[in-house]
Amino acid sequence: MADILPGGVPANHAEVKVIELVRRRGPDRWKGAHNVMIALPGIEEREIDLILVTDSSVVLIDTKGGRGRVTPAGPLWRQGLSVYENPAQKIRANARAFKTWLQDQDPRLHRINVDSLVVLAGENARLADPEGQDHRVTIPLADLMTTLQDARRLPRRHAPIDRNYRAWIFEALTKLIGPASGFKQFRDWKTTKKLSETDRLTEFLAFDVANPESGTALLQVHSPPPELSEAQYREHILRIRNGYDELHKIEPHPRIIRFRACFPNPGEAEVVTVMDHHTPYNPGDARPELIADLLEGLAHLHGNGALHRALSPAALVINMDGRGVLTRFDHARTGPPRGARSIDGEALLEAPGDDYLAPECVGRPDRLSPRSDVHAAGVLAFELATGARPADFDEPWGRLADEIGPRRADMVRSMCAPEPAERPTAEQAFQVFSADPEPDYADLPAGFEIDKYEVVARLGEPGAHAVAYHVRDTLDGGDRVLKLLHRDLVHARERVRTEHAILKHISHPAVTRPVHTNLYDGAIPYLVFEYEQGISLAELSVIELEEVRRFGEQLAKGLEALHQKGIHHRDITPQNLLWTGESCTIIDFNLAVQAGEPAAPGIGTPRYLPPDQPVGRELTAAELTDQDVYGLALCLYEAATGDYPWDAETPPPGVAPRRLNTDHDLADILDKALAPDRGDRFQSAADLYEALHYGLRARVRNCRPRLLVIDDHHTSTIKGELEPDYDCHTLKSKQAWDEFLANGGPLEFDGAIVDLHLSPRSLGEGIEIIEYLCRHTDIPIAVITMNTGQRDDEFNAGLRHRHRVVRLEHKHGEDWLDSIQEIARILTAETGTEASRRVLAVLDSAMYWMKLRTGDVAPDDPLLKRRQDFYTEYDEIDMLARQVRTVAEFRDLDRRALRLWREWFQETAAG
């Protein structure tokens, strides 16, 4: 065991840990002194935490107790929210000055090496020093003993420390340290070191000269303000003495400071209090393990009918075991409220500080109560957990849940409630913090139970806010997916509520749906989904291009279904797309918004956000759609190539993506989808679907387009005219159409040709087919109309989609089969949104039969007169057709026209 002499009292628990580690694990020949005040030439007087003489060097050690990453910045160190003077530079300067001083004291010590170390003793403390500024002298506590015993740190020109060197060094150190002198004595208490001084309070380390074995104590000298009157002075003295008298009335407790004495300082207008000395809590240090100690002490106070009334960081100290202890009982009292006049009300309200004072007590010290103590304890608990106060964060409660878990964060939030009745008791809060700590919800082990669900395995890596598990329902044995929001608990509940509200109205195979939701207060919020065996796209390597296009179509249709409901996902990334091998599903609607909700820019994963998304205002529905479609296209690109399309972390403005070099059709689609300017990209998920869908059909069919032909009279004629250039699928009746719909409908075709005259009663049926095609498909349609004399508004009198009609004009007697090839070309060449808005009109099939029957008729033939009569009657029908506006009227005219045509066909056939 190393011989470490006390030069002073450690300032904090971190220093205690370093001293005790060296004392217990160092060899007997090591000697040193802790908390030594030194004054060397060229540097100001300062305290060295530990001076240690090892086998190789004299080591000066400085201890830092903060948590987390330390980043050097020249003369400063940054750690969390704290910024302080660089201790590595300071301890190196001390070491150089100390070496010079040693040589001046004894020239024989010129070959002695004086080393320096900064020890990071806080939890998870680590140095982030990419420039190598301070890494050689800065180590974590775990490496301290290894470093002290490392002979390689001794430079070659220096000598190791033997018995003689050790004796000469300590002879010099005795001159440097010397005995303490010039300190005051108050009654039996002799001070050894001044710790702090203000105009109201001076603190010393002291010991009882009558009982020196009792150890070091903290002696406080309370000085009243000089402007007080005699009466005010007596009240001030009485207030201080009353506070510590109250402490004497309650049962001793390890979480309450042990009070030793309180007396006036004779001849001075001062009061002296003496109590056990512990390390002060350093405001800004995150020490969540102290919250239970704070609440245990407060619960003990309240259980004995006492109030603290001035809780703040100054009221918490840390003993040698690292446990928290309550102190600063200047304002404590027992019994019922005595009103503001019995105390120094102004001092009472100023004591804790505004952040710790409960709202109901502002300007009203008579309202201080156990619930106001709980409020102050809640703010202090937040500071212990995070190293900062709630006011330092825009979203404080989510940050707190990340540090101490959702259940405990909920308790602290209720402690800070604005209404006293909403706050728990100190005992209730202590029970929550004394219970077993919450598990790491981001990495639950197999077998862990959440309500009725038992964890089987984690699915993928945890996200920024959520993690997914394969779980088993212990009631029915079914497999499920449980999505658990493990961070930002306060907003997590709202996210779960929003996600459930969004998804319960969506029914689409490419969109996941919850089967159960948990939103109980104090519990971890989660959603449960049906289990599908699969992995996220982020876990896949490169996928076959045909598969990319296939699941791209599925996902585009899923987005289209969401957008039609006014829902935007806002975080389409590979992690949020589940691939089962057969299908792909959109998951994780944490950030989704519905129509009418505010949509701030920049929400989502930056790697998948459009480079030209507006900033500084809410996004429009079109911009939200663009964000989803852009993210999907980027996911498809990565799935197809295994690479990001730019040499950057996020999409750079004004730069086109790196082009695919394998599939020109897919390359064109992704070039357009990821264009730098939104106006050049697809304007909807439907547009992206069409590009993927129709391009894919062309590849599968080896570029031989398919046409749907519905016409009972001329089906074989049309099919024969178009094949083999086109693949025609023919239907000859309404019944055949109905059966066709039942087997999947017209989505497999590039276009349709429909004759309105399927049968004498079928004009309405033809209109019904066209209506269906217009409503449910995007394929272009050619409609064979009644005769060449009709205008668009006439032949469409029974159609609701007149705005989708474009008419092709032909002359009487012209063979309409001559134009069928041109019609087919238009149908199959124009795809996408433009073609989906066009309906092409062609000549009535009856004109073809009329030419066949009458083309060679002589001028004096009797049939010629009948032909003229036919046209006269048909013109009358045509005139009436211009005036109708209902389907029923149109059907009546259609039946009359059909009778006329039938009679004409019979006469010409007989002739």
Image (cartoon, rainbow, N blue to C red):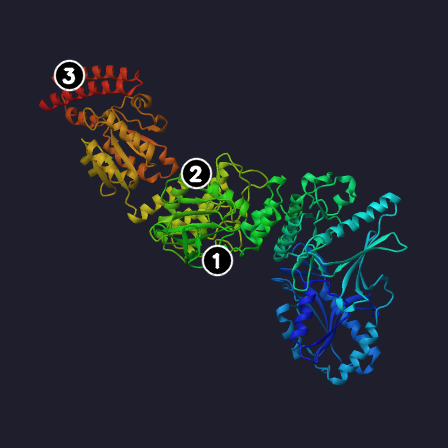
Question: Pointer 1: what residue?
Answer: 443
- Residue 107 lies, with reference to residue 487, above or below; the image says below
Counting from the top left corner in percent of width and height, residue 870 is at 18, 17
Residue 683 visible in the current orientation: no
Q: Secondary structure at mark 3?
A: helix
Q: Label 2: how many residues lie within 10 Å, few (<14), some (14-19) or many (20+)?
A: many
Q: Earlier along the polypeptide chain: callout 2 or callout 3?
A: 2
Mark 2 and mark 3: Cα distance apart in space: 60 Å
Nearer the viewer's eye, disc 2 or disc 3? 2
Counting from the top left corner in percent of width and height, residue 272 is at 82, 56
Q: What's the residue type where badge 3 is placed? A: Arg
- Residue 202 lies, with reference to residue 374, above or below; the image says below
Mark 1 and mark 3: Cα distance apart in space: 90 Å
Q: Is residue 404 left or right of residue 279?
A: left
Q: Secondary structure at mark 1?
A: helix
- Residue 533 lies, with reference to residue 191, above or below; the image says above
Residue sitting nearer the eye, 422 or 719: 422
Question: Pointer 3: what residue?
Answer: 866
Counting from the top left corner in percent of width and height, residue 586 is at 41, 47
Residue 563's disc number: 2
